[in-house]
Image: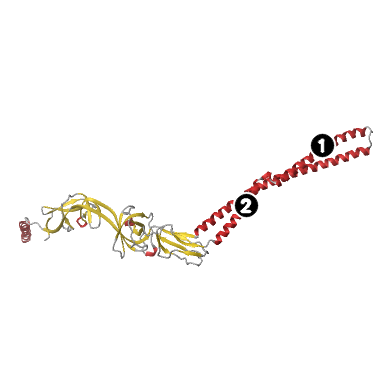
Amino acid sequence: MKKNSKFIILIFVIIALLTAGYFMFFGNNKITVEVSTMNASVGSLSKSLDLTGVLYSSDFEEIIVTPNLEILKIYVEENSVVKSGQLLAELDTTDYLISLEKAKISLEQLNSDLADAKGGSGNSEAVLLKNEISKSLEEYNKIKKNSDESVENLEKSKVLYEENVISQAEYEKNISANRDIESNLKIANLNYNDSVANYNDYINNNEQSVASLERQIKSLDFDIESLNNDIEKTKIYSSINGIVTKFPLKQARKTTTGSEILIYDTSSYEFIAKATQEDAVFIKEGQSASVVINGIPNSYDGIVSYLGKTAETDENSGSKTPKVEVKIKITLADSLLKSGYEGEAVIEVDKGENVIKVKNECIKQDEENKKYLFVLDNNLAKKVYVETGLSDGYNIVILSGIKENDEVIINPQTDIIDGTAVKLLN
């Protein structure tokens, strides 16, 4: 037991001596870490996005050519440069002019018929029908008067018959005569009612006829207007300045169904690209852009003129990433640009002026997601928490925590902590 106790004591003594020796040897000689540094600088910083896309004319005209007309004259061909208002071709108008003349003759007749119909009660047929009413009424009144007299005579003859002044045969003769007059009165009344009904029917039918004629005239007016428009279309003009990219017309041939002339504006272009949703959130209309077209040494300034409202997946690309359409208006086009050219655009999505900036690799993040960096202070690494802003992928803006010309450690090693002794790499 005594031997074991002595052995344990000896071990503790050795450990104590070693510890003391360590502090004696290293106590005044801290471990020094070699580092690279940079000075925080003040300047500008911008964030940009790179997009690939295709150049298109921002304005074009599509002229649908009327089919089955002979082409009398052509004045341009494909790739011709044209101006607004320039005549491109003339088509035959013969069929349209014949149809127009027929329509005008029909319209003249309809207007004449309408004038007669609107005469209403003043035309000859209406006058005849009115005369029939007058005649039948006159006849009815005449018979009515005779009927009244016949009734009065019949009453007198009845008294005379009862007083045996006249014979029974004479009395019965008066009764028969009265019956005939009453029958004639009923017929006269029917004739009068018929003449009134005929006149009313004519007036009603005439009103319907007027309405029908007015509808026909209106329809024919539309037909004439349409024919005039078709005649105007036989002379084909350009409404924009540009280049003719499609011109299917051949002189002395007939136009075919579906023929169209395409003219693209060569003074105005848009670069159209697709941005991923991660990039699209930074893009806004009005942002500055630079466009480079493959094969053209020039760079073209542009402005974001449109940002799609929805993100869609392009099935043809094979990618399942939703993308948003972006249009960039070229501010100053030249003759080198052509619709359909491919290229790349750089959009400046954010920019800071007079900001403090350091390299991205200077920034670290702790377990609480707080950002910090190390500043060189008397050969010691000083840990400083910072607030960061815009980054272009290489540099980052420091909003608070350091000032201009502070010497910051670049990409500090993991073993560097607050107070670590450091020295600059040779």
Q: Nearer the viewer, residue 276 or 377?
A: 276
Circle 2 or circle 1, nearest the eye: 2
Please name the amino acid that badge 2 sits on: Leu
**Disc 2, SS:** helix
Badge 1 density bin: few <14, some 14–19, many ≥20, Cα 10 Å = few
Task: Please identify the quarter of the rendering in which residue 183 is found.
Answer: top right
Residue 12 seen in this snapshot: no
Above or below residue 33? Residue 174 is above
Amino acid residing under circle 1: Lys
For mark 2, does the 10 Å Cα neighbourhood hold few (<14), some (14 to 19), or many (20 or more) residues? Answer: some
Which quadrant of the figure has residue 30? Answer: bottom left
Label placed on residue 110: 2
Measured in 3D between alpha carbons, the distance from the residue under mark 2 to the one under mark 1, in whole angstroms, is 49 Å
Tag of residue 145: 1
Residue 292 is left or right of residue 312, and the answer is left
Q: Circles 2 and 1: CB distance less than 8 Å?
A: no
**Whole-percent x and y of residue 133?**
74, 42
- Which residue is nearer to you in this view: 195 or 71? 71
Q: Is residue 237 left or right of residue 169?
A: left
Residue 369 shows which numbered tag?
none
Secondary structure state at the residue bearing disc 1? helix
Residue 130 quadrant:
top right
201 is higher (above) or lower (below) than 61: above
Residue 248 drawn at (x, y percent): 46, 66
Quarter of the image containing the C terminus? bottom left
Looking at the picture, tell me which residue is in the foreground, 41 or 73: 73
| Residue 133 appears in the rendering | yes
- Drawn side of residue 103 relative to residue 12, left or right: right
> Percent from the top left, x then y, of residue 62?
44, 60
